[in-house]
Amino acid sequence: MAAGKAATVDGSVMVARSCDALGDYAQQVLAVPRKKHEPRKKLKVGKLEGSVIDQVPETFAYLGVMSVVNGEEIHTAQGGINEFQVCAGASSGGFVSRRAEKMCPEMPTSLGDYRMTLVLERCKTAREGIKLIGEFTERYGARTDNYIVGDPNEVWLYEEFRGHIWVAARVPDDCYVVEANTCRIGEVNLNDSKNFMGSKELVTFAVENGLSEPHSKNPFNVMKTYSAQNEKAKYGLAVPEYDRRRIWRGISLLSPSLNLDHEKPVESYPLFVKPDRKITPRDFLALFSDHYEGTPFDAYGRNRGQYTPSVARGRADWSDETTRTKVNSESRFHLNKGLQYQLAPIWGTERIIGTPTSVANWCAQLRARMPNAIGGLLWTGLGEGATSGHVPFYSGITNTPEAYTIGCQGHYPNPTEVLSGSIYDEKSAYWTFRHVSNLVNLFYTATKDEVIPVWQKWEDDLYGLQPSIEKSALELFEKNPSLAYDFITSYSNWKATEALDMAQSMIRRLITIIAHCNSPL
């Protein structure tokens, strides 16, 4: 998701993303410094069928949520902000129509999501970032990815369609966009360079290959020409569960006055939408825990009221003999029915916004009124949205706690395979937060109140503290920028360490509750 600067409460450009993958897809949070490189140096992108590209003389510093693969020269940024407040994050991906698929070849040389890291390393504006992605696509090919790239002044949505075809549209300042695994850009005008960019052959390729009528009086419609909105069944994907319903839900929560019909096709929904009220980072992050509460699609809600949550939550005072006897006698029936095993509402056959497979979810604030080091802020959660706290990492910090730098891909089942996963490591921040998510999602009723409201209260305090922290940082920056860098680094690392301590305490508490509920009565 993304919002223009006139659509947010504080005038920041905002970008947010939830990355879902296998749960062992560990993430690191890294503060990467500026680096100089030898002349004529080459960079291998990807471990197996990767491409070799020219390295630039110097790469920029950035703060990123990174998927680190053993043995690779460059890693994938799931989300990050560089020293110029350019924000980029990996793809949600789309699909190409049958007709377009026949004309557009697969491109195994595509740089894929590595392009996000390259944007962070090489670009000073979002517009530069989109142009760089397009240049890489035209040279190395597309992979049906979509990206959002922003800076403090503007934010862009990028989409591609295999072969070398791509397009990008600027999000209006007073609007936001919600993107899922699909293609959403419709009518474009490449002569309007302020609001659109695209490959030179975007239109001509379509005409020459019979995908579009020549000399049409109507504006060129990218979605109708290249995307597979009505053909997803061929891929074995559930429709509308895979993309349409998530887009409908996101827009409905941010702009309920539109009263969108969930049965309408996604192409009928507006691409860029004005919010009913201006957006905060928390509004975006709240969506990452959504499971269609209050709608016919909330399967969990249909079962509410048949249990005794007060028993299962473990809230009773177990040191009191009277309470313990009373609760045990009342709870025997409920616990034996498997109450302690009630899965979280995000578990099910439908792919929802608040998916349990999220490995990282974040929201970036990009603010022109502040120095870049302080203006760029990445609210970062590792693990699933509802059960992880969001740490405020400022883009100018110079390091992150060691625990946040542990957890690599490529350990098993075959170290030569790029998509090999990570192995549990108790020293890893990712695995600690994932452990909390796993326990809550598998034993939801018994554990949720030990985690979800605790993170919510913690984040409330962070939002309340933010103005004073930034006031102090700005005062230090005026006197001595290096002191400001030290200050924001200390603050972000303090809160990152605090979150980790809280998660470890949660794990001890959750395991104790589960052990109690799981014992014969």
Image: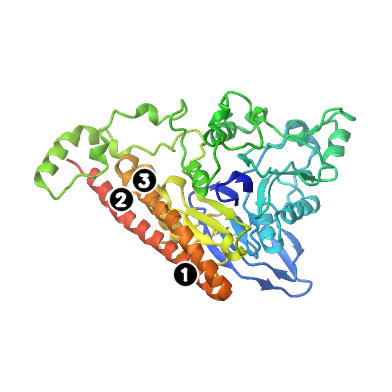
Q: Is residue 128 visible?
A: yes
Residue type (three-letter) at the residue carrying disc 3: Val
Q: Is residue 190 left or right of residue 355?
A: right
Asked which secondary structure carries label 1, the reply is: helix
Counting residues from the start of the chain, the first of labels 1 and 2 encountered is: 1
| Count of numbered circles in the view | 3
Which quadrant holds the N terminus?
A: top right
**What is the distance, in whole Å, between disc 3 and disc 1 at their CAs?**
31 Å
Counting residues from the start of the chain, the first of labels 2 and 3 encountered is: 3
Closer-to-camera residue (222/391): 391
Rendering quarter of residue 198: top right
Closer-to-camera residue (218/436): 218
Residue type (three-letter) at the residue carrying disc 1: Ser
Counting residues from the start of the chain, the first of labels 3 and 1 encountered is: 3
Which quadrant holds the C terminus?
A: top left
Position of residue 461 measured from the top left corner of the image (x, y, whole percent): 40, 55
Asked which secondary structure carries label 2, the reply is: helix
Tags 2 and 3 touching, CB below 8 Å: yes
Query: Going by the picture, which residue comes out furthest to the left?
Result: 322
Residue type (three-letter) at the residue carrying disc 2: Leu
Q: Is residue 209 left or right of residue 117?
A: right
User: What residue does disc 1 label?
Assistant: 490
User: What residue does disc 3 label?
Assistant: 440
Tags 1 and 2 touching, CB below 8 Å: no
User: What residue does disc 2 label?
Assistant: 510
Q: Is residue 129 above or below residue 92?
A: below
Q: Residue at x 27, y 42 (%)?
A: 313
Rendering quarter of residue 152: bottom right
Q: Residues within 10 Å of mark 3 (few under 14, many from 20)?
A: many
